[in-house]
Amino acid sequence: MRIVVARCQVDYAGRLTAHLPMATRVLMLKSDGSVLVHSDGGSYKPLNWMSPPCTVRFGTAEDGRDEWVVSQAKSDDTLRILIDEVLHDTSHDLGIDPGLQKDGVEKHLQELLAEHPATLADGLTLVRREFPTAIGPVDLMCRDAAGLSVAVEIKRRGEIDGVEQLTRYLDLLNRDPALTRKGPVRGVFAAQEIKPQARVLATDRGIDCALVDYDALRGMDDAESRLF
Amino acid sequence: MRIVVARCQVDYAGRLTAHLPMATRVLMLKSDGSVLVHSDGGSYKPLNWMSPPCTVRFGTAEDGRDEWVVSQAKSDDTLRILIDEVLHDTSHDLGIDPGLQKDGVEKHLQELLAEHPATLADGLTLVRREFPTAIGPVDLMCRDAAGLSVAVEIKRRGEIDGVEQLTRYLDLLNRDPALTRKGPVRGVFAAQEIKPQARVLATDRGIDCALVDYDALRGMDDAESRLF
DNA sequence: CATTACATGTCGGCT
DNA sequence: AGCCGACGTGTAATG
């Protein structure tokens, strides 16, 4: 990785065109050819960048100043960096990163709830995970004690669009005679945290809300693992 | 801005927990307190980070190694960076960045389509852009040859949530007697690219889809500009 | 300050 | 490779 601090001007042309006036910035050139232009603030997103796979051509502008042209083969996107003055320039061999280990995402939540569907509502049993429909898979399809089908939508944080999503599934599922033989398909909206507005909308549409305790579920799972 | 290259181990705890094993990485400390942990690859997104506003406490771990703890006041998120070896450490005064100038986003598409509504459907004429409703503005409100009102939602890429958005508008607009005198309000979902699922949903709801050719529109606009 | 819609989103998973 | 949905989404506009 090469890190350059320089007074520079940047022009991007791709899905949009963008321009950065001459100013001092940090340029990060990664070994895969990608380039990041960072200012001292904002967030983790660079002011401008080029994603890999791309190549950098280190050239010279008409007036003799250095100009770097970063281009992406596929998309015709180009990033032109005109360098006025270099204040710092170092390179470092970082090696390959072992990578990020995540925990606690929706997928894990779905796995845990698939194993313990009764924590969502009494008597619930799993029919299948990722139940396919024409507009996408339902996270969990279950059946309740009365034999009714129950569609479960799982989110880390339950907000309105999650309720909308479940509503679309329910609309579709309720047209399926095989699922509605014993009555309409119920909906359960499950999340670690449910926003008040989402709860109101869900309730208004007859969808049950279930708060999920991730740590408790993980505990149940550990206990179970120890037993077998 | 301070740039440090170091062998480090990073642990994040917040909405999720994540761990980065000991390896050499670039640490970017911005003047607003935010911290970015970059590897030599990936995209512009850091492996891990803390967004401002946040504060860094430069401390020492039990074994004597340096440990930086970055914490966000609001959310209780913390990022712990255990430093094994510093390979590089420099600071630079970048000043305030003049910022990015953009062009070519959805707004421009809307301008072009407002000038050429007939490219969306035969006989369409513009009533007004950003037609106000209680739940937000409709991108374009038009009228067709038969005198029916036509609500147009414009996206760069047409996906399901765009269809949902237009559906909400149509539900509302169709309750307005002034707009429905000659019949129900039609919906047109316009985008440079429409995902199959979005098309299915739109069609199911009686909404027309229109593929927009941005370059062609821009060409029409240029031709027109040259005439006047 | 909360909500909403956009983003050069990026990223991973699956077909 | 393309499609689809989640993301520690972030971020700007807007009421």
Image: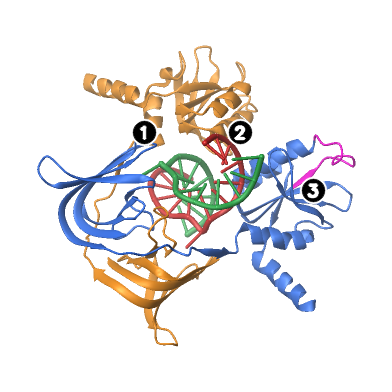
Chain colours: A orange, B blue, C red, D green
CB atoms of marks 2 and 1 within 8 Å: no
Reply yes or no: does residue B177 show up in magenta.
Answer: yes
Q: Residue A22: x percent and y percent?
A: 45, 72
User: Does dot 2 land on a helix, a strand or a loop?
Assistant: helix
Instruction: Tell which residue pokes out farthest to the left in this image.
Output: B63
Q: Main secondary structure of the magenta part?
A: loop
Element type at mark 3: strand
Q: Position of residue B51 (x, y in %)?
A: 38, 47
Report in which chain the residue with disc 1 lies. Answer: A
Q: Residue A190 versus residue A27: which sits nearer the camera?
A: A27
Q: Which residue is mark 3?
A: B150
Q: Is residue A228 above or below residue B14?
A: above
Mark number displayed over residue A168: 2
Q: Which residue is mark 1?
A: A108
Tag count in the figure? Answer: 3
Q: Tell me which residue sits at (85%, 39%) in the image.
A: B180
Quadrant assignment, res A179: top right
Subunit under mark 2: A
The stretch of residues the image draws in magenta is B175-187
Residue B171 appears in the picture as rendered: yes
Label 2 environment density (alpha carbons within 10 Å; few <14, some 14–19, many ≥20): some
Identity of the residue drawn at 25% across and 54% down:
A97
